[in-house]
Image (spheres, grey):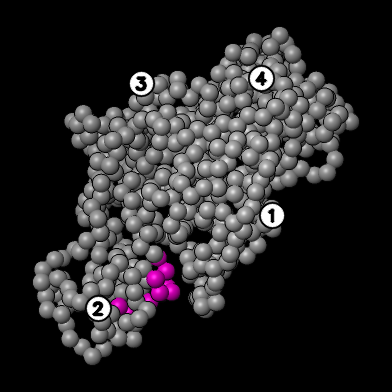
Amino acid sequence: MAAPLKLKRQQTAQKPKSKLIADLFPVAAVLVDTPVSHLEGVYDYLVPLHLEDSAVYGTKVVVPFGNTQVDGLIVGRKNDSQQIKNLKMIVDVSSPSGLISSQVIEHLELVRNRFGGSFWSLLKSALPARVAKEDKMISDIRSPSASETYESPQLRDLIGRSDYGMLIGKQRLKWAINLPIGIASSNFVNEIIKLRARTGQVLVIVPDEKDLLALKNDLKNFFGTSFLELGTHLGKSDRYKNFLIARFSRPSLIVSTRSGVFTDLEENSTVVVLSDLDQSHYEQHSPGWNTRDVSLLRSKNTSLLFISASHSMEISRLIEIGWLEKKNYRNKNGIQIVTGENGRSFVSSVKKGIAQGNVLVTVAEKGYANLFLCAKCRNTANCKCGGKLQIQGANSVPTCYLCDTQQRDWKCQYCGESKPYVISKGIDRNAEEIGRAIPKASILISSGSKQIADLPNGKHVVLATAGSEPNGRYSSLVLLDGERMFSRPSLRAEEFAKFQWFSSLCKVLPNSEVFVTLQNHHPVVQSMLKADSNSGASLELINREKAKLPPFYRVAVIIGSNLEISKFAENLRSSKDYEITGPVKFDQNQSKLIIRVKLEEGGNLVDLLDDVSKIQGVKGRQIFKIRVDPYDI
């Protein structure tokens, strides 16, 4: 593990004397945000007399460092210093006093030890930009009260009296909950939140603003002033103001996107992570972190509820070893699963559904004809530059996806035939075919930058790509492109496809028909028939372990110049502790290296990469770009 924060120089020196220095604990230990990563550390500074009361533990300050002024965080106050040279004076405070609690600092240290990088990069993720005018509201902040008597008979009937009793009890919970099929997911999650709030604070981490809005209205009406919203989607002023409320008040419920995962909570609180497999839970900046692992690193008295339509392999491993308790609640929903075997078409499912309400059709890709062949000889249609040709719309000409060249008079370069045969339909082509089969149906498309957040009034056939499904309930569900989704060249292809399909399945009404474009014997179809998304996880985990892949191995992806990456790879190959893949060139000047190490040795890998970055900084070399435990390899 990375070493704890400590002083850079440790030699005894006399305490400087000055009438301008604070009388009580005149020396502050300050974690300095230096422009050079290898100099990050704790340095001693004198506390001016006029800042004696405000420059306390957890306060951001401005301090001189070298020939410039930088940010710092006070992590201690004391009577004297062991640093040998004359101490410099803190210039000013740059945050409210005690803005960062000791619990948050300790939590950030644990996260830094797991993912590497600098403490300040994590602190900047946890702390929104200051809006000084909002600081004056701190004195007016009061802790709101919440209901301690709420009951939910419907939820009790679904989950049983035993689990219901534990949910409203004081004991620590460590649950992995599958969203039940046939019940509105937002209602189910909201009921769990309301009940758990009886026992203490609840922090809910959602993937994105769309998920937040799906929960917000009901919860805000219920909790009133005890409801708080956090996240980068808020304006700068509102984000900082709400952060102050979360820090200096104790709202019963905080709902946030990824950045709120570090929020300071009272003792015996509950953290709920919704859909941990969603990519939005992963921080994009190096070295990267994810809300699942950050939540797992909270204090041992914090309850953890992971709620998802289908859990990640990391959560499945924790269930398998008994660290998390699996909760799968079934109800009599009357949902019928049918497959495309024996040439059955999905159109009948669409017609049946549109007669009763809305229909959701999920597809793998946007666009029209993303890949087509010659109708005669079945050779792929390619451009002269080597790129594949695509058809953007019903009346569009074939266009190269690489050079954007249009081929108005396209003919097969092998046999001369001019008729295309589409084998990779996009969402637009599917919408066109459904429109022909059901001429009077209202067809909506939700994809890419043109997403529909909520179902409009009326009856509609909604076509959506992964993650673009409008919130609402559907009378029929069609899951297209199964083979394409489950066969993508990605580590998480099957995992993510199952998550998307079960997420859609949780949107259907009772007694609905669900059409699946996979064979009945496919593992995910069997899981759907059992109404258990975690079914078959044990076999998947065995295969992952044999292949030396996450969640049994930790992974680091390192990007750097071709020469430096090659040298680094050669040095690592002498160690038997690491599985090395690469280097692989991905442009003219840079290469990528993938390092895998057993789970229990992950800390050593993180320390190694931190040391390499510091050495590169000392020698003035370009520092590697490092991603630890990325979403995908």
**Between marks 2 and 3, how big is the CA–CA gap?**
57 Å
Q: Residues within 10 Å of mark 4 (few under 14, many from 20)?
A: some
Q: Is residue 295 above or below residue 573?
A: below
Q: Is residue 97 magenta?
A: yes
Q: Position of residue 485 (x, y in %)?
A: 58, 26
Q: Report, in whole angstroms, how far the alpha carbon at label 3 lies from the one at label 1.
A: 46 Å
How far separated are the C-alphas under marks 1 and 2?
48 Å
| Residue 392 visible in the picture | no
Q: Position of residue 266 (x, y in %)?
A: 45, 59
The amino acid on which the numbered mark 4 sits, given as a three-letter code, is Thr
Residue annotated with mark 4: 517
Whether 183 is among the magenta residues is: no
Looking at the rendering, the stretch of residues picked out in magenta corresponds to 90-100
Q: Earlier in the sequence, mark 2 or mark 4?
A: 2
Please state which amino acid type lies under the numbered disc 1: Asn
Q: Neighbour class for label 2 at 10 Å: few (<14), some, many (≥20)?
A: some
Residue with the mark numbered 3: 546
- Residue 587 placement: quadrant: top left
CA gap, disc 3 to disc 4?
A: 30 Å
Residue furthest right in the image: 440
Q: Label 3's element?
A: helix
For residue 65, above or below residue 452: below
User: Which residue position holds label 1?
Assistant: 217
Left or right side of 331 for 614:
left
